Amino acid sequence: MTDFTILDDSAEWQKDFERRLRTSYTTAGLGTATVERMLEEARAGVGDWTIAEITAAGTRVGYAAVVVTDDGVALSGRIGDLHVDTAHAGQGHEQAAREWAEAWCTQRGARRLNIRFTEPAGEPFDDYDVRGQLRARRVSFPPEPLDEVTSRPMTPAEYPEWLASEKTAYVGDIVRSGAMSPEEAIRKSDRDFARLLPEGLATPDNTFLVLEAAGELIGTGWLKHGHLPEVTYGYSLYIQDQHRGKGYGRAAMAAGEQATLAAGDSTLMFTVWGGNEVAMKLYTSAGYRVIEEDRSIDLSRSAV
């Protein structure tokens, strides 16, 4: 039988949690400074979590951490951590912990439950929908450019149309992933772009690219340098629909890697939304590893 006990003192759990995160991030190839910054951000977010010790026959076998928050639209639950020690894995404790976390969040009014993995999700979460993946790869050498594909800085005249297109695409990605309704996604898009680009094209530490082949525009790119220590974050590397299937996706990635090195960074990182399996396959083939994966489930659906 699997039991759960809420901890008054979570110091031991937090020490174990941070150790596991550090190992996962380091194994994924992130640099020491980046790992420490990500741990710092993770540490700042756990203050409101409820931590439960998972036990079996009086022996601790793992931990579960949960929280319910109000995002302004509805209450949402999150499993911040669900870990069963290797020696006790595969004995049903993971499924029991999932059920406990879902019940805990449902009792507090949550309509959706989210979970973030730094390792493969495993069978107990196969029916949770993938909402997004954080991927990264170290860039040690300048990439080989694709024949006839060039990149150049975006002009002020091109920026307004690009911005409108990016905001629309961002909303579409969020909705397709199932993370939000169209109305919620539009509000999020407006907030995020206002925060990220307060000075538009002149916002410091950002690169805006136009990709061309044979003099014709085929795509665009938007990158934020110094997102984390020595990390460039690719907010967008986009190839127009009519030019897809020609290998230009690789060209966009190469342009992003070139910009990463030019800015003095050594890792390119980005998010791919759930439902975009084509992009996921491309990134996997190019050596971009999954650093974190977000999944979620509708709690009313899980209770059926």
Image (cartoon, rainbow, N blue to C red):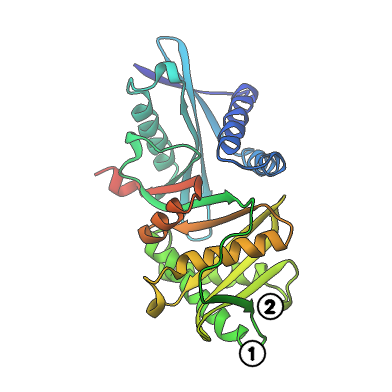
Q: Which mark is residue 48?
A: none
Pointer 2: residues within 10 angstroms few (<14), some, or many (20+)?
Answer: some
| Residue 202, position as x, y percentages in the image | 73, 77
Circle 1 SS class:
loop
User: What residue did someone put label 2 on?
Assistant: 200
Visible residue check, residue 257: yes
Kind of residue at badge 2: Gly
**Residue at image point 34% right, 16% down:** 1
Report whether 126 appears left or right of 62.
Answer: left
| Disc 1 + disc 2, Cβ < 8 Å | no
Q: Nearer the viewer, mark 1 or mark 2?
A: 1
Which residue does the image show at 60% across and 23% down from the upper left?
Answer: 8
Q: Which residue is mark 1?
A: 157
Position in image of residue 16 (x %, y %):
59, 25
Which comes before the other along the chain, label 1 or label 2?
Answer: 1
Does residue 93 lie above or below 68 as drawn? above
Q: Quadrant of the C terminus?
A: top left
Q: Of the residues shown, which amino acid type is indicated by label 1? A: Ala
Where 283 sits versus 34, above or below?
Answer: below
Whether residue 192 sits left or right of residue 123 in the image: it is right
